[in-house]
Every structure is written in structure tokens, then in C-alpha cells.
Amino acid sequence: MGVIGIDISSKTQASSSPSPDTEFLDEVETSQRYINILQEKGVDKIVLLTHYMYSNDIAMAKQLSGVDVIVGGDSHSLLADSELHREIGLVLRKGNTQQSFKMQMVTMFVLFKLGKMRCYWAS
């Protein structure tokens, strides 16, 4: 399994005072480049760990190939219901509304069978 970390370049540039020689790359292009590198090395399950905002994660998932799971953050959205995005094969199970404003540990279980995601569960 390979894990790729992605952050919002524009937000990072504005909020963290990077050095002038810091290079910021397009998030989607960079993700796909590293997905391809991992696949070439034989990695068959790829997780994106993002701080890219919920709406950006959904948009990015539609543009990428080879990603099995996206674990995202940053939007601080109040998410209470499950959501299905058939066009990208994405199922989201979100936390209880009452728990949305406190820090919580999330356990995620993803079952792959014959290379395809068959089951997803988070708590």
C-alpha cells in the first residue's frame, strides 16, 4: 500500500510563509504523477491523505485514476449523512452531527477482493 499526502498549495503559500525557493505544484497533476510512480513499483493499493477540502477531494477524485481511498480534511464541513458518488466509485460514511465539532479518532476498514473495493466502514 502506498500513501500520498496532498495539501492546498494556494492556502499553504498564503498561510505558512514559505521560503522564496519553495516550489508549489498543481495538486491533481502531482497526485497522478506519484500514483503512476507507485503503480510502476508494483503498489496495488493507493491512499491519498489530503488537507484539500471536501469539495476539492470530490473534484480531484473525478480527475485521477488509480486511487483506492481518499482520506481528506480541512473543510470543517458539518457532514452527517452517508453519500454515494457513483461516477467515481466513492462511498462516504460521515460522522454523527453531534460529534462533528470535537476531535475524534476515526477507524477505517476497507476490504478489497480481486482488486476491487468491496466493503468500506468507518467509525
Image (tube, grey):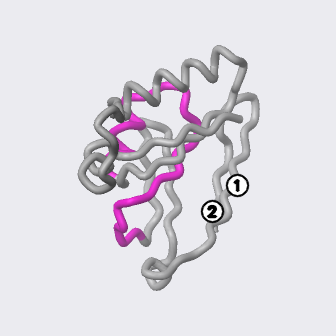
Of residues 86 and 59, the one nearer the viewer is 59
Q: In this view, does 77 lie to the left or right of 81?
A: left
Q: What element carries label 1?
A: strand
Q: How far separated are the C-alphas under marks 1 and 2?
A: 6 Å
| Residue 44 place in picture, x, y as percent | 69, 27
The residue depicted at 36 percent of the width and 67 percent of the height is 76
**Location of residue 77 (image quadrant):** bottom left
| Residue 19 place in picture, x, y as percent | 33, 41
Q: Residues within 10 Å of mark 1 (few under 14, many from 20)?
A: few
Q: Is mark 2 on a helix, strand or loop?
A: strand
Q: Is residue 76 left or right of residue 43?
A: left
Judging by the rendered image, the residue that carries numbered circle 1 is 109
**Location of residue 111 (image quadrant):** top right
Disc 2 marks which amino acid? Ala
Q: Which mark is residue 80?
A: none
**Residue 53 included in the magenta stretch of the image:** no
Q: Do the residues labelled 1 and 2 touch (CB within 8 Å)?
A: yes
**Residue lying farthest top?**
40
The residue depicted at 70 percent of the width and 29 percent of the height is 115
Judging by the rendered image, the residue that carries numbered circle 2 is 122
The residue depicted at 52 percent of the width and 42 percent of the height is 5
**Residue 73 included in the magenta stretch of the image:** yes
Disc 1 marks which amino acid? Phe
Quarter in which the C terminus is drawn: bottom right
Answer above or below: position of 20 versus 65. below
Q: Earlier in the sequence, mark 1 or mark 2?
A: 1
Residue span colored magenta = 55-79
| Residue 54 place in picture, x, y as percent | 37, 54
Answer above or below: position of 113 versus 78. above
Quarter in which the N terminus is drawn: top right
Q: How crowded is mark 2: few (under 14 residues within 10 Å), some or many (20 or more)?
A: few
Of residues 90 and 105, the one nearer the viewer is 105
